[in-house]
Image: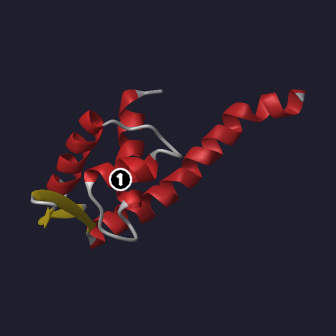
Amino acid sequence: MDIQLKRGLLDICVLAAIKDEDSYGYQIIKDMKPYVEISESTLYPILRRLEAAEYLTVRSVEHSGRLRKYYHITRTGLERIAAFKEEWKEIMAIYSFVTREDEEND
């Protein structure tokens, strides 16, 4: 898969993982696991990039004597998810065009 496409998809997956409630790194990985494998070394740069783009905010909370960072999606992040859903319709139309011969030969 094209690395830029995969990067964009992972960004959207992370936003979707925190869409309904604030979450922290390990929980985000756990929530995404049934759909896509992501490591900590991949997740944390994504979270920093999404924060820099103002798609999410971060707050620290003490948990078991340690600080845990919780991520919260912003209105801009929710708008990005909505835009992705619209973009996906175009991607699916392209996919249908590319695979039309496969379907005709079945």
Report if residue 54 is visible in the image. Answer: no
The x and y percentages for residue 6 are: 41, 35
The x and y percentages for residue 67 are: 10, 58
Reading the image, the residue beneath label 1 is: 28
Residue at the image point whose x is 18% and y is 64% from the top: 57
The relative height of residue 25 versus residue 82 in the rendered view (above or below) is above
Report if residue 15 is visible in the image. Answer: yes
The x and y percentages for residue 24 are: 26, 57
Q: How many marks?
A: 1
In the displayed structure image, the side of residue 72 where residue 9 appears, left or right: right
In the displayed structure image, the side of residue 4 where residue 32 appears, left or right: right
Q: Residues within 10 Å of mark 1 (few under 14, many from 20)?
A: many
Q: How is the image coloured?
A: secondary structure
Towards the viewer: 57 or 70 = 70
Residue at the image point whose x is 79% and y is 28% from the top: 102
Towards the viewer: 19 or 33 = 33
The x and y percentages for residue 8 are: 37, 43
Q: Quadrant of the C terminus?
A: top right
Residue 19: quadrant of the picture? bottom left
Residue at the image point whose x is 58% and y is 54% from the top: 89
Towards the viewer: 28 or 92 = 28
Residue at the image point whose x is 69% and y is 38% from the top: 97
Farthest residue, direction front: 64
Towards the viewer: 71 or 30 = 30
The type of residue carrying mark 1 is: Ile
Residue 44: quadrant of the picture? top left
Assign a secondary structure to mark 1: helix
Farthest residue, direction right: 106
The relative height of residue 91 versus residue 20 in the rendered view (above or below) is above
